[in-house]
């Protein structure tokens, strides 16, 4: 009799477990489930964000958009009503990024902050993001579609999420700077980047934009160097990448010089880590008599440099 009862019990348990594959019939109702989010950083192994924000967009009528902030980079538990959702996740520790259109899965956008009264943008910092276009939360657990297109089902309600780099790190190094002792400050304006990015399909918007950031003066090695982040323009963009170096001498006079860096950017070994190198420049010395003509307050072409009559250092 004990054997027969055990057989019946095993059969009933098997039938109950198999019923979870028919969620729409045997797991009805709307209730709140705890869902555990786990961030996997295989695509961005150097990432260590201070926190992540998640948006869940319902695909069913009458559903609400849910937002969660999770401290750290590992993940944690959240609570969601049963239903089907689409999810966008990104790191929330970047003061250089604003997020707009948070009421739309298709249009939610990350934007670089712009400099006051200018169209130039500041460094975004490294933005990481992940999208899952189908998550079904039921009383039986969760199922979701991975980035590779496979469907995962987990009765423990565990979702693995793999953020990737969305920003591009641009490192500018200017070597063999002759007369670096005359440099008080230096900055660059990199034109050709994008100032916005749609999360859903990582599509850049608002390009070409100009990324503006200061350079560090390495007097001992005669180098000017710094890094900053922005959103890269799409690969099929025909807009050239141009770099403008702005130098203010110790006597307060400012100069600028333009470089076409398109080949270095487009042929970079890593599309998310672009290194731009300029070798051998001479900082203007002494008093230079500018030409008689000028363009927009900038005197043109003095030994390869433009003399800036209006100091723009304060906007960098």
Image (tube, rainbow, N blue to C red):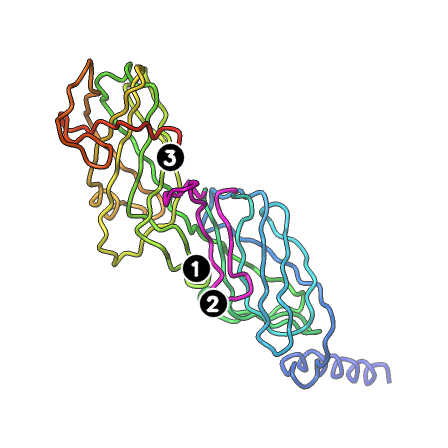
Q: Are marks 2 and 1 in contact (CB under 8 Å)?
A: yes
Q: Earlier in the sequence, mark 3 or mark 1?
A: 1
| Corner quadrant of residue 5 | bottom right
Q: Which mark is residue 106?
A: 2
- Give percent across and percent down for residue 138: 67, 74
Residue placed under numbered mark 3 in the picture: 213
- Give percent across and percent down for residue 142: 63, 70
Q: Earlier in the sequence, mark 2 or mark 1?
A: 2
Stretch in magenta: 95-124
Q: Is residue 278 left or right of residue 154?
A: left
* Spatial CA span between label 2 and label 1: 8 Å
Main SS, magenta residues:
loop
Quarter of the image containing the N terminus?
A: bottom right
* Spatial CA span between label 3 and label 1: 24 Å
At mark 3, the secondary structure is strand
At mark 1, the secondary structure is strand
Residue placed under numbered mark 1 in the picture: 198
């Amino acid at each position: 009799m004990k054997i027969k009862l055990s057989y019946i019990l095993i059969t009933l348990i098997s039938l109950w477990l198999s019923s979870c594959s028919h969620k729409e019939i045997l797991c009805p109702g709307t209730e709140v489930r705890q869902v555990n989010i786990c961030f996997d950083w295989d695509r961005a192994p150097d990432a260590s964000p201070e926190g992540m924000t998640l948006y869940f967009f319902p695909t069913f009528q009458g559903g609400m958009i849910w937002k969660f902030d999770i401290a750290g980079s590992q993940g944690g538990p959240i609570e969601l009503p049963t239903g089907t959702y689409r999810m966008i996740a990104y790191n929330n520790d970047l003061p250089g990024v604003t997020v707009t259109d948070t009421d739309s899965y298709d249009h939610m956008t990350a934007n670089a902050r712009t400099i006051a009264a200018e169209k130039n943008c500041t460094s975004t910092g490294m933005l990481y993001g992940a999208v899952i276009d189908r998550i079904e939360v039921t009383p039986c657990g969760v199922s979701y579609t991975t980035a590779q297109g496979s469907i995962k089902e987990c009765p423990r309600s565990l979702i693995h999420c793999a953020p990737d780099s969305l920003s591009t790190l641009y490192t500018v190094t200017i070597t063999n700077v002759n007369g670096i002792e005359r440099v008080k400050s230096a900055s660059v304006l990199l034109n050709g980047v994008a100032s916005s990015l749609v999360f859903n399909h990582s599509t850049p918007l608002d390009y070409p934009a100009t990324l503006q950031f200061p350079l560090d003066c390495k007097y001992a090695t005669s180098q000017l160097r710094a890094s900053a982040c922005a959103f890269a323009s799409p690969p099929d963009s025909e807009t050239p990448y141009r770099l403008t170096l702005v130098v203010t001498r110790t006597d307060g006079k400012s100069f600028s010089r333009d470089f076409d860096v398109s080949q270095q950017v487009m042929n970079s070994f890593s599309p998310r880590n672009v290194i731009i190198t300029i070798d051998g420049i001479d900082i203007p010395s002494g008093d230079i008599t500018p030409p008689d003509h000028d363009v927009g307050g900038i005197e043109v072409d003095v030994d390869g440099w433009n003399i800036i009559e209006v100091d723009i250092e304060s906007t960098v």
